[in-house]
Amino acid sequence: MTAASTGYLASKPRYEILDGLRGVAAMIVVAFHLFETYSKGPAFQILNHGYLAVDFFFVLSGFVIGYAYDDRWNKMSLKDFFKRRLVRLHPMVVMGMLVGALFFYFGACGAFPAIGATPWWQVLLIFLLGCTLLPAPMAWDIRGWGETYPLNGPAWSLFYEYIANILYALVIRRFPKFVLGLFVAAAAVLTIDLTLNLDLFGMLPADRSAAYTVIGGWSLTPTQVYIGFSRLLYPFFAGLLLSRLGAAIRVRGGFWWCSLLVAAALVTPHVGSVSMPWIDGGYQALVILLIFPLIVSMGAGSRVTDVRSIAVCKFLGEISFPLYITHYPLVYMQWGWAANNPDAPLGTHIFVSVSVFVASVGLAWACLKLYDLPVREWLKRHWLMK
């Protein structure tokens, strides 16, 4: 039985640096969310631009999809492609929902007004819906934040990741480079529309709480859906275009320099004064449109050769997705604890936050080793290779 007939194709060599950078960004996302508990708003947030990690993940994903699949469509059907993507992503989607369900009631506080009135059977139904990655309508919100995935908020970005994979497989993989370049240029307009709050298409209300930013995408309102697609289309397909163009910049010590650039982009304080938010919007546009593609090009063109760098990249790459998709239920719990204990000493708040960070990393590692890798291996043997 050939690989083509079984739907199984051996994985290509990985870009170790890109894997490592995904892990660097995931670590910063966890810290960003922990600090967000104490934030007075986006302009005052410590690790201020941590939310841009989602846009960076999309650039990475687009590049990797192009590298992994662009030259395989003569050996692989649409069904094969979707099966491979499901095997790679969906086991941890289910685990993220399970963790969210198990920790749901521990986050009860004034910030999550619906938790206390939510019966267990409704949590179970939302868990089952979340396992399909179908978004929950606003009327089914069981937390009070209007999230499409109230058990595990960050899953919204996986929903858009799936949409990007579908668009790629059905349509955009057929685009020649020139047409793809035009598509990416058009998508850049959406990024600029968000970051500079131009509202070219009448989708951004005047009272938008996070104006002049790309923050959003996690609800089913028309504005939030527009934000979600705007955050997806340029980064993901710019990454795909980089892959097709062979855009690779070789840098000595590339992993460490790229990691520094990622960290700098995500932790830079709010740029400009609060009274002139367009300056920070311009910064976000610069990072998404230019800096992130540059970092991915540098990561793709550079190599790691020393044992320490290889080990660091491997660890960060392996843990990145499990960490991203399982940490937020613990953050909900930390948020609830902080809200219910506002007078606790500063040292106690720091201890709780550090403990949640360490627990998040430990949980992600355990999920990877005890669940994700074994399940994916089983699915490869019993589903992909049939």
Image: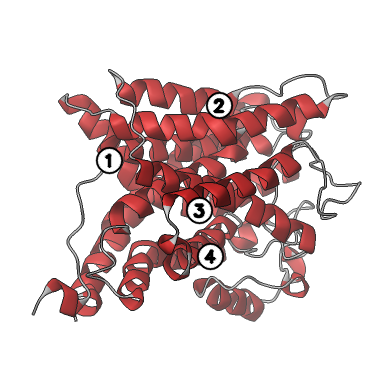
Q: Position of residue 96 (x, y in %)?
A: 48, 61
What residue would you read off at disc 3? 179
Count up the numbered dots: 4
Amino acid type, callout 3: Val
Q: Name the residue under label 4.
A: 163
Instruction: For marks 3 and 1, give the CA distance.
Output: 26 Å
Circle nearer the N terminus (4, 1): 1
Residue located 74% across and 53% down the image: 109
Amino acid identity at mark 2: Ala
Asked whether the residues under the numbered discs 4 and 3 touch, taking CB atoms below 8 Å apart as contact, a structural biologist would say no
Which of the two residues, 207 or 137, is positioned nearer the viewer here? 207
The amino acid pointed to by label 4 is: Ile
Q: Which residue corresponds to mark 1? A: 15
Q: Depth-wise, is mark 3 or mark 1 nearer the camera?
A: 3
Report how far apart the C-alphas of labels 4 and 1 lie in the structure: 24 Å
The label shown at residue 265 is: 2
Q: Distance between the residues labelled 3 and 2?
A: 30 Å
- Judged left or right of residue 163, residue 209 is right
Q: In this view, does 301 lie to the left or right of 226?
A: left
228 or 199, which lies in front? 199
